[in-house]
Amino acid sequence: MNTEALESIPKIFEDVQDFLPINGTDYIEFYVSNAKQASYYYQTAFGFQPIAYAGLETGLIDRETYILQQGKIRFALTSPLRSGTEIGRHIDKHGDAIKVIALWVDNAEAAYNETVKRGAKSYFAPIIEEDEFGQVVKAGIYTYGETIHVFIERTNYKGVFLPGFRPWNPGYKPATIGLKYIDHVVGNVELGEMNEWVNFYGDVLGFTQIVSFDDKDISTEYTALMSKVVSNGNGRIKFPINEPAEGLKKSQIEEYLDFYEGAGVQHLALATDDIIETVTQLRNRGIEFLTVPLTYYDDLKERVGQIDEDIEILKQLNILVDRDEEGYLLQIFTKPLEPRPTIFFEIIQRRGATSFGKGNFKALFEAIEREQELRGTL
C-alpha cells in the first residue's frame, strides 16, 4: 500500500476538501505476453521482490499473475493461458502495457458509486472476494483509452496480496535498488483530448489541476507537446496527461499513439532517496537510459544553484537536475522497456521540489528525438 512521502505533497492540498479519499497507489497491473519471464526481468534489472502468485496451481484456468514489490510499489504481471482472451486481445493491440492503475481506498463501494454518479463508465460493479485471510472489496471504472482504475478496499484483509493468491517465495531474489514509491503516472491521449481527461479527473474523481505546460514550455526545433498535471486531494496521486502539439516532425506523443494504437500510460515515475546509487545499480544490471550532451552540465550550478550531489558523478550517470520554489529534484529516463517505443520508467529523487522538471524538458525531448531518429520515426 502506497502512502507516498509527505514531503512530496504540495502545500496547495492542505485545505482541499476531498470527496474521494485515496490512500495511495495499491498496485499497477501490466498485461504481458509472458508473465514468468517479465517477473524475472523486473526482479533482475529493477530489484523487485517476489510476493505472490495466482495461476493454474491456484485454480485459475485463463491467466496467471505474478506479484512483485519494492518499497511501496507493487507490480502485477498478468498473462493469458489460452487464446481468444481479453488479455490476449489487449496485448495484440497495444503490446505489453499497463492495464490497471489500482487505487487504495477505505470504501470501494462508495468510491465506485460516487464516480459512476459523476459520469465514470463502469468496468465492474463492487464485488467481494474472500479467503481464509479475510475479504477485499473491489470495483472498477474506465479512464483514458483502455486503462482502468480499480478501487481496492483491504481493511479487512491480512493475506499476501488479494484473495486467490498464494505466497511466492523462490530462491532467486536479487537485491533491491532503493525504489520507494510511485511519484506519478503519465498518460498520453489523442490530440484535443487532454482537457477532456483533465475535466474527467476533476469532475469525476475530484482531482485538482496543479500544473500546466503548453507547446512553448515543451518544444524543440522539431516537435512539441502539451501537458497538464492533476492530483487528488492529499497529493498522493499525481497524473500528468499529455497530448501532441503541432510541430515540424512527429513528436514522441504521436509516436507513442501510433505504436500503442491509442491512449494509454506512457511512463511511471519511481521515487528513490538515493538516485546515484539506484541509477548506478540499474546501469550495472543492463538498463539503458536516455542521454543528454555533456554540455548540459557546463552551467548546471548557475541554473539550479547549490546542490548536495557531486556534479561530476551526475554527469557520469547523465542524471538531470531542476529547481523550483520548494527545492530541487534529480531525474533520469530509461529507454523504452518493450519492443514498441511506448512505456518507459523515470527515476526521480525529490530534494524538496514539487514540480516535474520543466527546466529539463528541452534537453530531455531532444534526447528522445535522437532515439526517434535512430528508429526512423521522427
Image: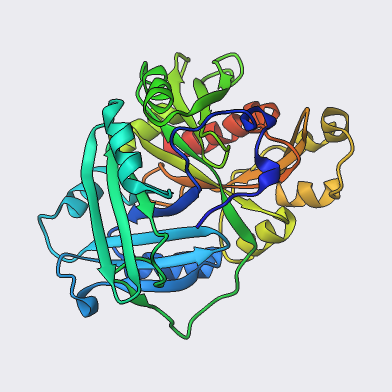
Q: Is residue 375 left or right of residue 53?
A: right
Residue 77 screen position, x and y as percent: 35, 61
Residue 194 screen position, x and y as percent: 41, 21
Q: Is residue 77 left or right of residue 272?
A: left
Whether residue 26 can be seen here: yes
Looking at this view, name the residue that lies furthest to the left: 84
Residue 353 screen position, x and y as percent: 73, 36
Seen at 54% across and 35% down, the residue is 368
Which residue is nearer to you in this view: 196 or 125?
A: 125
Seen at 80% across and 37% down, the residue is 297
Whether residue 363 can be seen here: no
Residue 171 screen position, x and y as percent: 47, 86
Q: Is residue 208 above or below residue 185?
A: above
Q: Is residue 341 left or right of residue 130?
A: right
Q: Is residue 212 above or below residue 354?
A: above
Q: Is residue 95 above or below residue 359?
A: below
Which residue is nearer to you in this view: 30 or 295?
A: 30
